[in-house]
Structure formats: C-alpha cells, structure tokens
Image (cartoon, coloured by chain):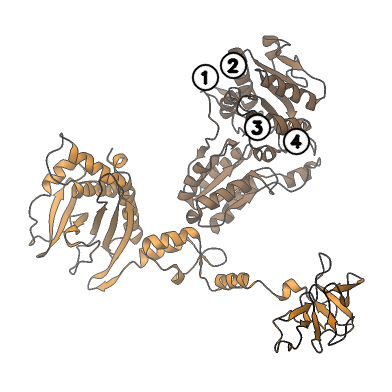
Amino acid sequence: MAFQVIVPRIGWSMEKGVFSEWLKHEGEFVNQGDAVFSIEADKAVEEVLSEDAGTLSILAGVALPGTELLVGTVIGFLLEAGEAPPVTAPATPRPATLPAQTIPVSKQAPDPKASQAAEARQTGVVASPRARRVSRELSVDWRRLTPTGTGGRVRERDVLRSATLGGVGRNRGSGLVSLLRVRADATQLVALLDRLADSAYVSSVSDHYEAILVKLAARAYLRNTSGVAASCLAVGMISSEGLGYRSLRGAETHSVSELAALSQGPVGLEDTLSGDEAFTSLSLDSLGLDEYLPEYDVPGGQLLLFGRLARSSTRGEGASIALALSFQEAEVSLSRAAKFLEDVRIAVEDPFVFLA
Amino acid sequence: MRELSYIDAAREALSEEMARDPTIFVMGEGIGPRGGNFSTTVGLHAQYGSERLRDTPISERGFTTLCIGAALAGARPVVDAMFVDFALDGISDLVNQASKMRWMSSGRLEVPLVVRACMGVFSSAAAHHSGSYYSFFAHIPGFQVVLPSSPADAKGLLKTALRSRDPVIFLEHRALLATKGPVPDGEYLIPFGQAAIVHEGTDLTLVGLSAMVPKCLEVARTLAAEGITVEVIDPRTVAPLDVATICASVKKTGRLLIVEEDYASCSVAAEIASRVGDESFDDLDAPIRRLHCGFAPAPYSPALEKAMAISTQTILQKTRELLAE
C-alpha cells in the first residue's frame, strides 16, 4: 500500500512552506525516521522525517526547489516493492506557485455548510425554530412563505399571516370560504367531562361535550367581540341525511347542563341558518370528520366551529382536540377569525378557569 | 405601603434577624460605630454591641476565613466586604473550604455564612471598586448568589440568606443603594431560585440582573406607550437560577434579550442563553441576544465609564433591534 508524502505543519501557525530540496532520490528506499526532504517555514529550514517506509516515488513537477507549497500537499509516495504509484493523486490543496502574499488557506476553502446556509438565507428558505413549530401545528409549508425576518428568516408572524390568509380556501359563489385549524390539548376538558359524568348533582345527560364546547366558544366569542352579545348561536349536526342546525339562544347565560338538555333531540334538517346566529358549533364526530366546508353558502358573518375530541381509551389519560373554523373572508375579517379560534383553543385547554 | 431605600430595607432585615438569632454577628471594616462605608450597619452597634459588630483591620482573607471557622462552629457570621472587589482577597477559603465543606464532611458540617458586598459600575469608582464578579461564585457548586434589584427584594432575600444553611454571596449594586421603593410591613421572606416577573408582556422577554432591572422596566414602559409589551424578568438569584420562569416567558414571546452589567464571556447571561436554547428551542422566533458592559476594567474617567456601562437607551435600542429580527 502506498503512503503519501505530504507537506507537514511545522509549528502552530504554518499554512505553507517553501520547498528546499529532496534528501532522497527517486526510487531510493526510505526507512522510518529518515529525512526525506527539507522545507523552509517560519524563516527556518527543517528536515522532514518519514513516518513510514517504502520506495520513494516523487510526484513530477510539484515539489521543486523554491516552490511555495500549502500544508497537506501530496508531493510523492512511498511504495512497496513492485508497487506502481497511484494513477491519480488524491485531492490535495492546490500547490501555491504564487507570490507569498496569496490569500490564506482558510479563505481559499470556505466551509461548504456555511456557504449552504448563506445561500439558504439569500433564497429565503430559513425559518426560526418557532416558525417551524407553528408551521407544523398549522400544516403550513414555511418554505413557500415570504420571510420578513432579518437576513430572510421566516418568522412566526409570517406563518400566522399565511395560515390566516391561505388556509384551505375554495372560491365560491358569494365569496371565499376559508378554513383555519389548530390542535389543542384536551386533558383538562376531558377531566371536566369525567367529573360531570360522575357527579350526582348534574342531570343525567349522557355527554356534556357538545354543550361545554358551545359554552366555551360563547365565552371566547364574547371576549373576542368585547361585549357584542353572543345570544344567538346555533348547534349544527351532520347526519347521513345532511346538515342540520338548531338555534340556541343565550348560550352565555345558560348553564352547561341546560345547554346539554337544549341541544338534545333531532335537529331539523329543513332549518336553515339565519344571519342572526353569531357562530355555529358543528358536531362531526358521528362521521369521524375534523372539519367541513359547507356546500351551500353560510349566512354573512357566520363562523362555523368544529371540535373533534380524540380521547384516550384509558380514562384519566391525555386527550387532544382538533379545532377548525370555517368562515367567509368577505364577511369576517381574517384576523378576527384567527383570534376567535385562538381564544377557543385557550379556553378548551383550561376550561376550569375559563368557565369560572 | 411604606417606602424605604434599598440600603435601609436591607439593614432592617439584618437588624430583625440579629434580634431573632443571637448567633448572627457581622465582621468588616468600619461596620462598628461608623455604621459601614455604605451604611449597611448604621445604628446596629448601639443596639447589639461590639461583640456582634466587629470592626476589623484591612485583612479580608483573615476575617473571611475566621468567619468560615465561626460558621463551622455554629455561629451565623456576616462578612461585610464593602466592595466585592475586596471579597476576592478571601476567595481561596471561600471556594476551597466554605463551598465544599458540606460535601467533604459527608453532610456533617455546614457553613451558614453570608458574604455581602457592593458591586457594579457607578460614580467613577474605577477599576478596583466597580467589579461584579458574581459569575465567579455562580460557577462554583455550593454558593447561593443573590442579586436583589429593589428595596423589597433586598429585605426579603437578605432574611432568607440569614436563615440559609449554606454560604450565600449577597451583592448590592451601588447604583441601587439610595433607590426607594415600597416595602411590605411585617415579616416576609423571599425564597431563592424564584424569579420575579416585574412587568408582563407578550412581544419580547427582557431578563435583567441587579441594577439592570429598573433600566429594563423603564424600557418596558417606554415601549408600552407604543403598544409594544415587553415582559421583564428579574431572576433575583443567579444560583440557584430559575430558568423555568424565563422559558415560560419565551414560550409567550419567542424573543429573549438578557441584560447584565458584567463581562460577556462565561457570564450568567451566557448560561441563561444556553439553557433557554436547550429547553425552549422551538419557541424561539429570533436568536437569543445579550447585552453586557465593555470588556475592560472600569475606567475612572466619567466619559469612559459612561461608554463602558449599559444605559437605558442602549437597552431600548437593542430591544427594538431584536423586535425587528
């Protein structure tokens, strides 16, 4: 096996040296510890001792007396008996047959990773960790966004704006219907449901989930609209027959149990939403769906809220809820819809505090 | 609520604890009838006498080590080092004995010692009287390092220090000594390792240490007028360090600027930045930024000192820059 004869680093700061002379001839056998060549570095000529043994094969035209060579340059090989020198020399630093004031090595060979990162910044495909996280949560591809951060970094606000503007949109007759999605931790919500189910003081309605979601959403809505009454809202339901609604008035004043009782029973499919309803909570659990864009127009100003609860099969363990909001961009400002959904998320994650 | 100056609140804590615990005594230069160079013990000599307020010669290593011995023997000494720069004269026995004794004795020996001293760049006190040095102590296992920023905290934290079973380094910034603030009536203690959220906000988190806290508050108030809400956090103790409160804030804001009047290299701010980076990486919407004083001994020249120290204006500028990142 051939050993490389290279220009070594003699002293901490040496980047290159001036070749003085070969101390062995072509074809001469070199033992470990033999002086092979001498080189001038840091104003002193040093003899370089061989670390390996073999027959010297000098690489033609590289190490000539007076030539400046970079540290690491291959200038020859030590071969076994009968071995031919490698046909192509391995990649080496370019021999610097240049004046002494050439650019230092470190600048000639930039770190490829650093240049990639710089290129990524120039092409706008870097994102802050927070922006990446929010992108994952909102299913947004941050690589497509227009960055507003320093050096072309995508920031959280860029993702949020995109989620609000884009969403999953469909162009429809009377305007664009958009959908916003967010996933919330429902551990506290499930704990509350379990306590209601266990409590002897609450009427025997089987599941309060829908009623609590309506209640929390009504509270969030009130907070969001600073005082505008949420007295009109609807509870929707999708069955195999289609989509039906029940208007539910005074959600903010009814107790959870009262709401649960009110929303029981069949929903009239012939009922249509009126413009009175502030927002509608839709249950899609029976169909196993998280979200829905209605085929017919939602009355102006309507917000359709969906909340599908994924409970762990074991009681007392974690749960999550997929929240979605569809609305008409022409009627409801995008930022308001996003704020409402965020308030619902906060309420769902901490229902005890929010219902207090 | 009544208003007290920072130094008066701290002295009230010391006096209350000396009345409660007869094993507490103070050693230092000029802390007897003179009442301390920074009025740390004014009036206490008349109240508690020379046995418990022991004036010393200029011999920091001697009386620091003597106090370590007294603490090992069951007393609660307070080393009043005047300037933290002077406390460095006793650092060998603090580090090699006081901080390690609990471990070296398998828990049989305790060193309930308080070293209090003034620190910080202020009023042209120059290179030998302007050090901070708390990062030295925070680096060593066994020390609790306390940096109160308000009169109420100075009192509550000093009382906790005077009841601690392990050595406490209690550092008061000279720029704070005369500042006034509300101090609750009656007895209260502030636990170590519990940061204070001194101003709530959602746009950016400012962590300030010691005298930087009031400056950060000023910045928060300036920006609040523009509708930008900055959360200001005062860790209060840098050992133990309450990183959880900072991380919870960064979860809200996504932006963190740490301001301390100490050198940048190997600093507490570097430690905070590293730990927040570890624990809150996915919450960061911009790089963690730090603001430090210049990397040089504090100069005597008022103009140079001003250039080296951290002004409210600089914090405001760095905050704006980070908000724009």
> Chain under label 2?
B
Q: Are marks 1 and 2 in contact (CB under 8 Å)?
A: yes
Asked if both marks, 1 and 3, belong to the same chain, the answer given is yes
Earlier-in-chain disc, 4 versus 2 = 2
Q: Are marks 2 and 3 in contact (CB under 8 Å)?
A: no
Give the residue pinned by disc 4.
Answer: B123
Q: Check disc 2 and give the amino acid type.
A: Glu
Earlier-in-chain disc, 1 versus 3 = 3
The image quadrant where one finds the C terminus of chain B is: bottom right
Give the residue pinned by disc 1.
Answer: B187
Q: Can residue B146 be seen at all in this image of the molecule?
A: no
Q: Residue at x 29, y 40 (%)?
A: A352
Earlier-in-chain disc, 2 versus 3 = 2
Asked if both marks, 4 and 2, belong to the same chain, the answer given is yes
Q: Local crowd at mark 1 within 10 Å, few (<14), some, or many (≥20)? A: few
Earlier-in-chain disc, 3 versus 4 = 4
Horizontally, is A178 left or right of B135 in the view? left
Q: Position of residue A132 (x, y in %)?
A: 45, 62
> Chain under label 4?
B
| Mark 1–mark 3 distance (CA, rounded to whole Å) | 22 Å
Callout 3: helix, strand or loop?
loop
| Mark 2–mark 3 distance (CA, rounded to whole Å) | 21 Å
Give the residue pinned by disc 2.
Answer: B16
Asked if both marks, 3 and 4, belong to the same chain, the answer given is yes
Question: Which label lies toward us, 1 or 3?
Answer: 1
Earlier-in-chain disc, 1 versus 2 = 2
| Mark 1–mark 4 distance (CA, rounded to whole Å) | 34 Å
Q: Position of residue A107 (x, y in %)?
A: 73, 73
Q: Local crowd at mark 3 within 10 Å, few (<14), some, or many (≥20)? A: many
